[in-house]
Image: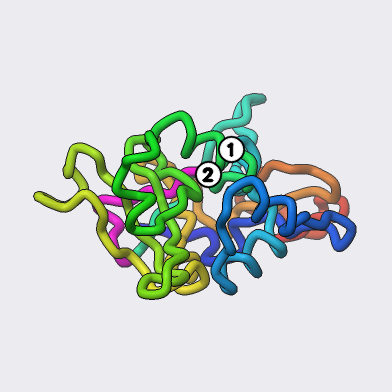
């Protein structure tokens, strides 16, 4: 198992000008976000299409994925998908759960998915579960006989367990990877190629 990067390096940071109207969110949802999760959504881009930074490599003229992000403390069960924006979270909640669902009683709010889209990640906003991160499994397939499984005490603890792991069948050594300035994909340095020969390369 070879790791390319860990933790918050897998996320895009927000622009300082990209503010969230939390007062408007409270009016729409009736939810006061817990402090650590609120700090997280203020700091990092959250979107179904744009949360986790995809790492691709150019080989034989084609860009292919280098690997995927996993939650290391539970690597066998939990690959990381995307995190929702607050608007997307509200939309997912309205689409998947009726008002009598247990998530409302337990004060759980959907914030993202696993890599397969099968499990929903949730944050607690109640007095007894504030900021705690859960995996919701409607068919109880994540943990037998459990619909909600506590996975981390808060979003920062959770994300610190993330690692971008290279695909097993990849024959590339991490030390061969480089990027030219302004590119959003990796290139593979040939053996014997001097790193200075790649213009503006960054490792």
Residue displayed at 33% across by 58% down: 106
Residue at 59% x, 73% y is: 35
SS of the residue under disc 2: strand
Question: What stretch of residues is rendered in magenta?
Answer: 73-81
Q: How is the image coloured?
A: rainbow
* Circle 2 Cα neighbour tier, 10 Å, few/some/many (<14 / 14–19 / ≥20): many
**Residue at the location (38% across, 70% down)?**
129
- Percent across and percent down for residue 50 are 65, 41
11 in magenta: no
- Position of 27 with respect to 169 (left or right) is right
| Closer-to-camera residue (53/129) | 129
Q: Which residue is mark 2?
A: 82
Q: Quadrant of residue 8?
A: bottom right
Query: From the viewer's perspective, is residue 96 above or below residue 197?
Result: above
The CA span between labels 1 and 2 is 5 Å
Q: Nearer the viewer, residue 178 or 165?
A: 165
Q: Is 144 on the left or on the right of 59, as rendered?
A: left
- Can residue 190 be spotted in the picture? no
Secondary structure category for the residue under label 1: loop
Q: Is residue 112 visible?
A: yes
The numbered dot on residue 48 is 1
Q: Position of residue 33 (x, y in %)?
A: 57, 63
Residue 124 x/y as whole percent: 42, 63
């Amino acid at each position: 198992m070879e790791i390319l990067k860990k933790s918050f390096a897998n996320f895009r940071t927000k622009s300082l000008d990209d503010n969230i109207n939390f007062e408007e969110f409270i009016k729409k949802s009736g939810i006061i976000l817990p402090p650590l999760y609120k700090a997280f959504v203020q700091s990092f881009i959250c979107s179904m299409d744009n949360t986790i930074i995809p790492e691709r490599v150019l080989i034989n003229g084609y860009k292919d994925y280098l690997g995927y992000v996993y939650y290391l403390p539970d690597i066998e069960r939990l690959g990381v998908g995307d995190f929702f924006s607050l608007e997307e979270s509200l939309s997912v909640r309205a689409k998947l759960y009726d008002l009598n669902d247990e998530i409302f009683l337990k004060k759980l709010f959907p914030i993202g998915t696993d890599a397969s889209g099968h499990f929903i990640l949730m944050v607690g906003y109640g007095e007894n579960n504030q900021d705690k991160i859960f995996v919701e499994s409607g068919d109880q397939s994540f943990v037998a006989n459990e619909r909600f499984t506590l996975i981390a005490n808060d979003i920062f603890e959770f994300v610190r367990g993330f690692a971008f792991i290279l695909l097993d069948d990849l024959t590339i050594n991490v030390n061969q990877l480089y990027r030219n300035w302004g590119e959003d994909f990796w290139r593979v340095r040939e053996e014997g190629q001097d790193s200075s020969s790649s213009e503006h390369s960054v490792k």
